[in-house]
Amino acid sequence: MSEQQTCVRCVLDSTVPGVRFDENGVCSYCHMHDRLAKTYELSESNKRKFSQLLEKIKDTGKGKKYDCIVGISGGRDSTYCLYKAKELGLRPLAVSVNNGWHASVAQENVRKVVEALDVDLKVITTDWQELRPMYTAFLKASVPSVCGPCFVGTISYLYKTAVEEGIKYIILGASFQTEGIVPLRWNYIDGKYFENIVKKFADIDTGDYNKTTISNLLNYALIKKIKVIQLPLYIEYNNERIAEVNKEKFNWVDGGGHHFDCMYKPMALHVRNRKFGVDPRKVSYSALVRSKEMTRESALRQLEEEPIGGDWDGIDYCLKQLGMTREDLEETMSSECKDFVDYPTYYSMLKMFKAPVKMLCKMRLIPETVYEKYFKT
């Protein structure tokens, strides 16, 4: 067995799927970060392009109540993005999707920020009785992407709301600068993959919940002309400063750690780390190191000193919500590990459309990070 290698620049190592190292020991994800950083550098040219984009959003929304949607969970990034959207002169509709795991502290954060900014809020609450078997299906499928139902539902409801309201722009708070790009094998999801797993392990139809099929996504992007904008790509973005602004302006409360807004996090961390060896901190810490918000030494030290997971109170809560026991969880943990390639997906089709996807990214119809994630990792 070859010796484990760690990037000399960040903290990603050879246990991370898809990682490659150049002759100097720098990993492929660092090179990916550099490409994206160059594309979205805060140059005068990019500032002008962003200004033009803002004007286009405002012009497209003329005569309508809203000119964009901002997805908000009550976490750090989405709270700040809603604030920036309003500050930039946009007229956002805030959309919050409660899939049964939305933490109360996050819901309170959402309430405070929309009231302070005088922004309309649409809360979409999913039917838990329909959603629960979707979560258990992904556990039974024995794949790392245990949060697939949340991702599919959130994206689907944002697009559906955009169509219903006649809105052409969806603004999200995802940031490669502070979150990094998660390896494809750790959280792969697409509409076909989702439908096949739910059908196989829950024997139910996803119905109107899943709008992430290829036909739907092409319809949204090419026919409906709905664009997804990752706002952090266009503005100065610093984790510590963002948290300070949120607290000062909205009395925002940090519920503890990244994605604290989700009560399913303890279960997801436990299954993904103990069964599949997934440590999401390696990705987020590496992003912060590259963005000079964290030292490499500090990141390595925290990875050693702070074991991941172990929140059994949180895990037991999740088990109760899912109608499972610890014995059921143990059965899940001991089953053979699977990968997204073990199930029908759109992945082979996506690889055939590498050039068109690249074109859509260049047209800014979809974020450049999509191309990097699906074709470079």
Image (spheres, rainbow, N blue to C red):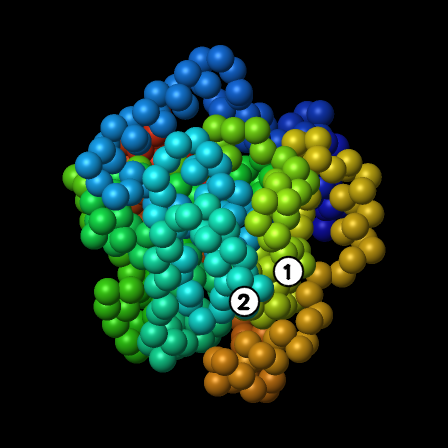
Q: Name the residue nearer the viewer: 236 or 297.
A: 236
| Residue 108 placement (x, y as % from top left) | 53, 62
**Which secondary structure, mark 1?**
loop
Mark nearer the N terminus (2 vs 1): 2
Could you give the CA–CA distance between mark 2 and mark 1, rounded to whole angstroms? 9 Å
**Helix, strand or loop status at disc 2:** loop
- Are discs 2 and 1 less than 8 Å apart at CB? yes
Residue at left 26%, top 39%?
168
Drawn side of residue 365 relative to residue 283, left or right: left
Q: Tell me: 219 left or right of 170.
A: left
Q: How far across and how far down the image is residue 334, in percent?
A: 59, 76
In the displayed structure, does residue 21 sit left or right of residue 133? Answer: right
Which residue corresponds to mark 1? 255
- Which residue: 29% across, 38% down? 67
Left or right relative to 297: residue 281: left
Question: Crowding near pointer 1: few (<14 within 10 Å), some, many (20+)?
Answer: some
Q: Is residue 72 above or below residue 331?
A: above
Q: Which residue is mark 2?
A: 103
